Amino acid sequence: MPSSPAVRSASATGLRLGPGFKALFYKECLRFWKVAFQTIVAPVVTTLLYLLIFSHVLESNVKVYDGRVAYTAFLIPGLVMMAVLQNAFANSSSSLIQSKMMRSIIFVLLPPITSFELFCAYVFGAMVRGLAVGLGVWLITFPFVGAAAAVPQHPLWVIGFAAGGSAILGTLGLIAGIWSEKFDHLAVFQNFIIMPLTFLSGVFYSIHSLPSFWQGLSHVNPFFYMIDGFRYGFFGIADVSPWRSLAVVVFFVVALSAIALRMLATGYKLRQ
């Protein structure tokens, strides 16, 4: 019995990026750009409020890296990376679940587009939104610490961890969007995985200030390595070796990409 167009599309293989990828990637970018006030400006303003509140309350009470870095300067890279991660996840997950709920996913599956192209279009679109929000947060917080603290000492590390972190969360959002059958399911990822792991990853503190039990627990949190490595790019100081953080990021990029590609190739929860 011949396969349906959707099945043929989902099971297609290959590493080329043809016109189908370009069209879907453009659609993913246009989707959030058309509502940029909601998808880019709003998270930038929310992150700015975090900076205003936490820096005002904790600047004179918290020392990080033995006082070598001011708390407000320490806080900014964490907030930038938090914005990148949360918005990369939101973009791919919301796009998939909306298409499934509105039954418009068939228009994505019907064209002759491979699973690899589908994967790249959704993840790259998520990365663009995450990095755009992160850039906006960085620029708007620039005046709070001045150029000396805001300009990264190692920009390649900053770019690498921003790209890797947004790729991980974009891929995780893709998996969540495919797995979820309704918005309640997606909320499980957002409220019980993304949010707790982000807030317990050292965005607002150095893990060296924690009791030993919580320090040990932080080392099994992959979000900690993304933020700590990103922060190393700004100050040349980190809680763990940046190479170790990079290894963790690469591992999760490869592992989650393999899972997402397998789900797309088999049409998992996409054929109904």
Image: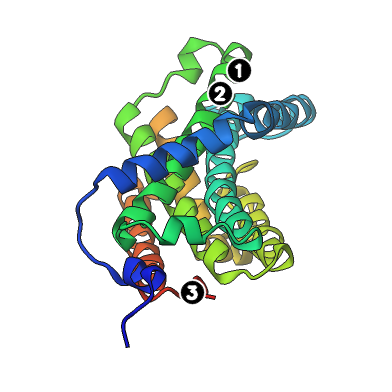
Q: Which mark is residue 136?
A: 2
Residue projecting furthest to the bottom: 1
The residue closer to the viewer here, 41 or 216, is 41
Gap in angstroms between the C-alphas marked 3 and 1: 44 Å
Is disc 1 placed on a helix, strand or loop? helix
Is disc 2 placed on a helix, strand or loop? helix
Disc 3 residue crowd, few under 14, some 14–19, many 20+, Cα 10 Å: few
From the top left corner, tell me how far across and down residue 190 is, in percent. 66, 58
Please, is residue 7 above or below residue 56 in the view? below
Q: Is residue 260 visible?
A: yes
Which residue appears at 48% of the width and 36% of the height? 29
From the top left corner, tell me how far across and down residue 111 is, in percent. 36, 56
Which one is in front in this view, the residue at disc 3 or the one at disc 1? 3
- Is there CB contact under 8 Å for labels 2 and 1? yes
Q: Quadrant of residue 3?
A: bottom left
Which one is in front in this view, the residue at disc 3 or the one at disc 2? 3
Quick one: label 3 or label 2, which is nearer the N terminus?
A: 2
The amino acid sitting under disc 2 is Gly
Q: Quadrant of residue 35?
A: top right
Disc 2 residue crowd, few under 14, some 14–19, many 20+, Cα 10 Å: some
The residue that mark 1 highlights is 140
Q: For the N terminus, give its image quadrant.
A: bottom left
